[in-house]
Amino acid sequence: MSGEQRHGSDEGTAPPRGLAALADAAWLRSLIGVLAVLSMVTLIGTLGSDGGRSTMALLHALSGAALFVVLVVWLVASRSALAAVREQRRAWQQSRRLMEDLVNEQTRAQERIELLATVDSLTQLANRQTFDERAARLLAGAYSDGKRCALLFIDLDNFRLLNNGYGHRVGDEMLAVVARRLRDIIVEPDLIGRRGGDELVALLVDIPGADHAVEVAQALIKSVSEPARVLGMEVAVTPSVGISFFPQDGVDLDSLLNAADAAMYQAKESGRRTYAFYTPTVARRVDLRLRLEQRLRKAVESRDFRLHYQPLVSLADGKMVGAEALIRWRDAELGDISPAEFVPIAEESGLIVGLGDWVIREACRHRQEWRALGVDVPPVSLNMAGVQLRQLGCVDDLLDVLGEYGVSATEIEIEVTETGLLDTSAVSRENLVRMRNAGIRIALDDFGVGFSSLAHLRDLPIHRLKIDRSFTVECMRDARTLTIVKAVVEMARSLGITVTAEGIETQAQQTWMQHLGCDSAQGYLFARPMTAEDFLKLFVDRRGAGRERSLMH
């Protein structure tokens, strides 16, 4: 390929540049040709006018024509060059704009990445890592400057019940609402972040005294407790706040967090929706709790528990129609430990599954022994925690134990708390249905302490409903509570669900709940929880010579 051919090929792939490019343009070559012809015509005309005798005339003609051609070419070339420059400038400006857009987009993307790495996406508060890093720097500065700080550990009361009752979407929206309210109260240079779940923390820097921390805690408790409209529903939550101080309760973040966390549990034990300080008493309770958990783990491994039974009495004739199996624990070092103390620890630590399995197996063993003695006791109720109910093999394991001891499904009843029955997980629902289909009766325990409504009774696969002791007591002196209990009893009876009143301790309570329409009752008025041996003796003695005597007073 020749040089001219290569040049032409290059011109076809790049825009024209300068006068050299203009000279190659076809229209310009045609123009020059026309100008050349005109110049020749002018020259011939000049020569023809004097017969060629005048040299000066010839030179003038040639120079005039040449000057004219050059002038025209220069004007055209200048105009074309100017257009090319403008085109190049527009192209450069467009490229610069594209480059700026690209840089801006990269900057925004980097900012989004940094935001995701430092901020909790749900609450838009500092995430755990970011809070820890910033708090550590603030505490280091406070230590150097001799300033005092306060750490607030904020936990939403019964938030798990809200999630189970209304769904996690409502729970997430409520968390976002709480976070916005907290940001209005806690502003820079103070720091606020989310630890996880419904646990939030705030660091107040350079506080003048403990009163300032109290004022902030009271303000956020009041703000957070206000009802909010979430997804078309009015929802309310309350916070419990634990407070620790720097440097008296700890000189590092971990120490302050542990202290404030312990104080938060003290606030919950004090009735919730309040605050508490970390004190030596709280520290001792935390130590006792840790020690209790360690002892509980050993007790679960060694099966160091006992089952007691509390009779269930018919309010129609006073006969024993069942009994509830209740776990008891006597530790070699700590003595008798109340279920109210060790059961929550078992649930939080995951020990409740092993504990629940032991209860089921021990109750079936007792029934097997009683049958061998020729005694046919009424059905026994066994408590099952929500954690157990969510186990995939829950029903299969239960049926296997029944088969192992020769206990029929009708001889036991499973009691599940309101929270457990309102669990929205598919596994829990399926397990409840499978139990019912297998012939196992299901009771709803402690009704009224959670977020359920009467409408839920229609959808739950239950046979019996137990009204919580607090309602049993309050309905005799509070009109609103009485209205609720009446509605519960009427709804249950219309659905074919029997009703049990818990916590009956006086004759007046027995008469009152009987008048309201409860089918059975349980409480100290009839019998306290007793060992398996004493329970068997009570049942046999009451039956007498084939006729059961009433337990009612």
Image (cartoon, rainbow, N blue to C red):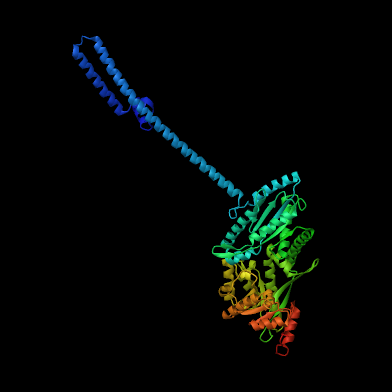
Residue 271 falls in which quadrant of the image?
bottom right
Would you place residue 468 above or below residue 241 in this image? below
Residue drawn at x 29%, y 18% as measured from the top left: 66
The one nearer the camera, 292 or 131, is 131
The one nearer the camera, 291 or 265, is 265
Count numbered badges in the picture.
Answer: 0
Whole-percent x, y for residue 4 in the image: 34, 25
Q: Quadrant of the N terminus?
A: top left
The one nearer the camera, 135 or 180, is 180
Whole-percent x, y for residue 47 in the image: 21, 14
Residue 238 falls in which quadrant of the image?
bottom right
Whole-percent x, y for residue 495 in the image: 57, 79
The one nearer the camera, 311 or 410, is 311
Residue 147 horizontal side relative to residue 10, left or right: right
Q: Quadrant of the C terminus?
A: bottom right
Would you place residue 89 above or below residue 447 in this image? above
Q: Residue furthest right?
A: 333
Residue drawn at x 76%, y 80% as measured from the top left: 534
Residue 58 horizontal side relative to residue 444, left or right: left
Residue 1 shows up from this direction: no
Residue 536 shows up from this direction: yes
Residue 83 horizontal side relative to residue 425, left or right: left
Residue drawn at x 67%, y 81% as measured from the top left: 513
Would you place residue 160 above or below residue 59 in this image? below
Residue 455 falls in which quadrant of the image?
bottom right
Whole-percent x, y for residue 498 in the image: 62, 80
Residue drawn at x 62%, y 56% as measured from the top left: 181
